[in-house]
Image (tube, helix red, strand yellow):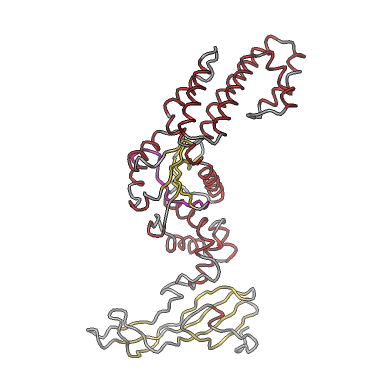
Amino acid sequence: MFGSRSDSLNITAELLGLSDVKVNDVRTNLSAREITISVERTRKNIPCRQCGEPTKPHDMGRKLRLRHLPMFGKETIIEIIPRRGRCEHCDGGSTTTETLNWYDANRKLTKPLEHHLLFELVNSTVADVSRKADVDYHTVDALINRYIETEIDFSTIKALGVLGLDEISMKKGYRDFVTLITYRIDDKVSILGVVEGREKSNVIQFLRRIPHHLQKTISAVCCDLYDGYMNACKEVFDKTIPIIADRFHVRRLYRKSLVNLRKSELKKLKAALTAQEYSDLKPAIALLRKQKDHFTDEEKSVVEPLFSLSPKLKQGYQFSRELSGIFDSHITPEVAKEKMTKWINNVSAPELNCFNQFIKTLVSYQEQITNYFIARNTSGFVEGFNNRVKVLKRRCYGLSNTTKLFQRLLVDTMGMVRFAPGVTAF
């Protein structure tokens, strides 16, 4: 049952985080675990909604019951009766119902509670927040559209630093791709945009929306070996901005060539050796499957019997190790080109054709690959962000809309700052 005003609860408007009001009454309902707080506006004048001039008092509006942030483990309700005023300056004497900055007309929640729900939504789901806060699902979901922008506001960005482009599949079976465009500045990775599909034209359309003064702050662009992304960046950005083919995507290609060589050589050895002789090679085979670029002295003694039986396999690993050594070296792009050209000539000399397809790729994208040596930028931050998106997709069902995906990414990446307790944004 409701009691009279509780003198033991010294609740003030400042404590509630509400402005331009004073607390008149505090009532508790123990059975419903509810605290009801009646407040009254402290400002004298009601500005006209049309001309902004002060109005004369004219009746009272209906009582509003707004749900506020919980207190003492109880649901908190703010009660306020807004006043009405009539304007003498406007034709027809229009009436205005007073409003305050901590709630919106026709809403059931105060803005501090709405911000709290958005803060709880970070790294969570609408369904979870709805259940925990006992707020309707659609009410929580509607907060995203009301508070979170559907596209990036470039005016809030001072610089872009390193730009990253990569695709991600929205559905199982690598279907319905979207392109994620991120940027890294001061080791902080942020989302810039989500582009439907991965076609060059769509990417160009988005990149051209980047203001010219922000394009000047781009130090490099990192992506995989997809022509659509590279050509889009070439067409939009200044030639002085290096486009970098991620070294780990390059490594994956020549390591794949090496894996194919290993499988073919092991197949030949299995047919030529006895079961016991092949079984003795299993420790070496297991070590090679780890795809290590360098072996310790102990590991060398393990793989040496296998290499002695297959000189071609040994040669393949030597060439792979040499190329990894080039990428690990702190050299200039010019020196890197010389070393890679020499490596290509050396690989082409013996009867070793496993790297032939990779060599074509290396020659075609030599400039983008060697641009890595300018500042040793990689797409590592892009891949890390993609993993975050994959977790978000598993956590939130039905994120097939690019706009919704962008909004949820903004909540997860910026929500801790924008909606943190004590931050006033209304």
Quarter of the rendering containing residue 153: bottom left
Q: Position of residue 161 (x, y in %)?
A: 45, 49
Quadrant of the drawing holding the C terminus: bottom left
Residue ranking furthest to the top: 272
Q: Is residue 12 above or below residue 422?
A: below
Q: Is residue 112 above or below residue 80?
A: above
Q: Nearer the viewer, residue 233 or 342?
A: 342
- The answer to whether 142 appears left or right of 272 in the picture is left
Q: Is residue 392 above or below residue 199?
A: below
- Residue shown at 42% from the left, 48% from the top: 194
Q: Position of residue 123 (x, y in %)?
A: 56, 55
Q: Which of 118 and 367 is in front in this view?
A: 367
- Queried whether the magenta region covers residue 201, the answer comes back as yes
Quarter of the rendering containing residue 350: top right
- Queried whether the magenta region covers residue 402, the answer comes back as no
Q: Position of residue 408 (x, y in %)?
A: 48, 54
- Residue shown at 42% from the left, 49% from the top: 193
Q: Nearer the viewer, residue 181 or 371?
A: 371
Q: Where is residue 124 in the image (x, y as percent from the top left)?
A: 57, 56
Quadrant of the drawing holding the N terminus: bottom right
For the question of whether residue 331 can be seen, the reply is: yes
Tell me how many marks there are: 0
- Residue shown at 26% from the left, 88% from the top: 88
- The answer to whether 253 appears left or right of 86 in the picture is right
Q: What stretch is highlighted in magenta?
A: 187-202
- The answer to whether 239 appears left or right of 339 in the picture is left
For the question of whether residue 378 can be seen, the reply is: no
Q: Is residue 213 above or below residue 32?
A: above
